[in-house]
Image (cartoon, rainbow, N blue to C red):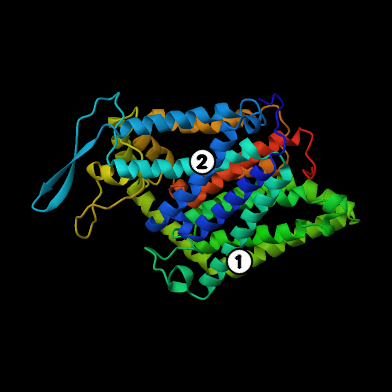
Amino acid sequence: MNQGPHPRSTGGLESAVAAHLAVFIVGVSWAFGGNADWVRTPISIWGSLGILLALASMADRRLRDRIPAGTLRWVWPVVALNGIVAASCLTPGFRQLVFRGEAFLLPVRVDWWNPSTTRVGVTLRALWLFDGIYFSCLNLALSVGRRRIIRILLAAAVGNALALSVFGTVQKLVGATGIYFGSVRTPHEFFFASFVYDNHWGAFVILMFGACIGLTLRYATGGRGAGFFHGPAPAGLVAATLLGISIPLSGSRACTLLLAVFICVALVRGIPRLSGALRHSGTARAGAAAAIAAAAILAVAGTWLVAGDVIRARTAKTRDQFAAMWAAGGIGSRSVLYHDTWRMARQRILFGWGMGSYPIVFSLFNSQESKLDRLPVIYHDAHSDWLQSVAELGVAGTALIGLAVALPALALRRRRVTSLPYFLLTGCVLTAAYAWVEFPFGNVAVVLAWWLCFFGAVQYARLTEAPQAAGGGP
């Protein structure tokens, strides 16, 4: 195996990996973010091609020798997770009872040390989807040896997100009552573009915003250092603005706050680089500062012009919700939901109730009823991805997912993290933090974008210190 930190170019394989991921992110994002039941199987089939590409790079000795030392060790937590989920399918946690033509699921006593699941088919399909996404994105670390390929892939992903944001903005401005200009009805009014849920759109854009800012700063000095106005950086700033506007326009309040945090981080790190690039282009220091200030003012004004009505409406709703929580002395139904989910998780804390089992099992622990008809309030998600992971996979499975992230992240120790991987990872961190109080990873497109940005950042940082292949670029 190659003992250097970076692989050499694998030619056709790395192009195949990039093309596969580009089609993947475009297809999933336009197909309702992957959150329509009928698109899950085609998505999983396409993800299986990524698994085959990963197996090809591992099985072929010539290709395997080009994989950086230590990379294959990143895979063992996911292999172990697959083993736990496969073992859970051998032990049913529920049994079916038919009474007067109606089928009921009843829980079965399972020993604490024995993995189990509710429905084998649901669990295997969820695992298939996860593996397809994970290994497709892992291929960036296994097979891509040129930073230019990663930049092209990320630019394609950002361009796709920009197209979606423009589409969603037009859709919103003309008053469409459903996705694709009303042709597809949604459960609630706050859909955006092709995404059913505004908070899922917001999380997706946070990740793509990070990629956009990173690419913009990467090209701030223009092509071959020709200056700010002789490269793609100005277009990148416009794209970042349009992406950012789409978040408050969608109605996602939490992601608007995340965006504000992200913008602050981007300003701290980006202004010195942009100012230097402008001065390199012949702009005086005062002129560079004035240009940056003018651009910021225009961005804020444009945001208010396009999304002002939505911002005012959502702000008013937020005030009402805070007033209600203050009067009730708590955070309302969300607190009850978290408490009930934790009760569910505690009963099978080691291995959980089974991958994909939350909607079925939670009905046994749900203590909330409608005030109108006393019927149970139905929850498909825990509105906390971390808590739901413990409920479904237990602390063992959740820890393995954490290790699948931690092991590649350790490869960044003592490495130079340039602007592009820095902002990719910033988007990943913000989204993972958001997952404590919402369920962004309940959306397939967000999961795919997260792993794409994560492995793109890790591999780009590893390649930064290596001599680049022809065409790799700085």
Residue position marked by numbered label 1 in the rendering: 304
User: Does label 1 or label 2 sit earlier along the sequence?
Assistant: 2
Which residue occupies the foreground of this view, 326 or 205? 205
- Placement of 200 over or under 72, stated as above or below: below
- Where the N terminus falls, by quadrant? top right
- Where the C terminus falls, by quadrant? top right
Badge number at residue 85: none
Q: Secondary structure at mark 2?
A: helix
Q: Residues within 10 Å of mark 1 (few under 14, many from 20)?
A: some
Residue position marked by numbered label 2 in the rendering: 51
Q: Residue furthest bottom?
A: 174
Q: Residue furthest left?
A: 100
Task: Give the residue type that dot 1 points to.
Answer: Trp
Which residue occupies the foreground of this view, 457 or 304? 457
Q: Residues within 10 Å of mark 2 (few under 14, many from 20)?
A: many
Residue at x 56% of width, y 57% of height: 26
At which x and y percent is residue 270? 74, 47
Which residue occupies the foreground of this view, 147 or 254? 147
At which x and y percent is residue 76? 50, 27
Which residue occupies the foreground of this view, 417 or 19? 19
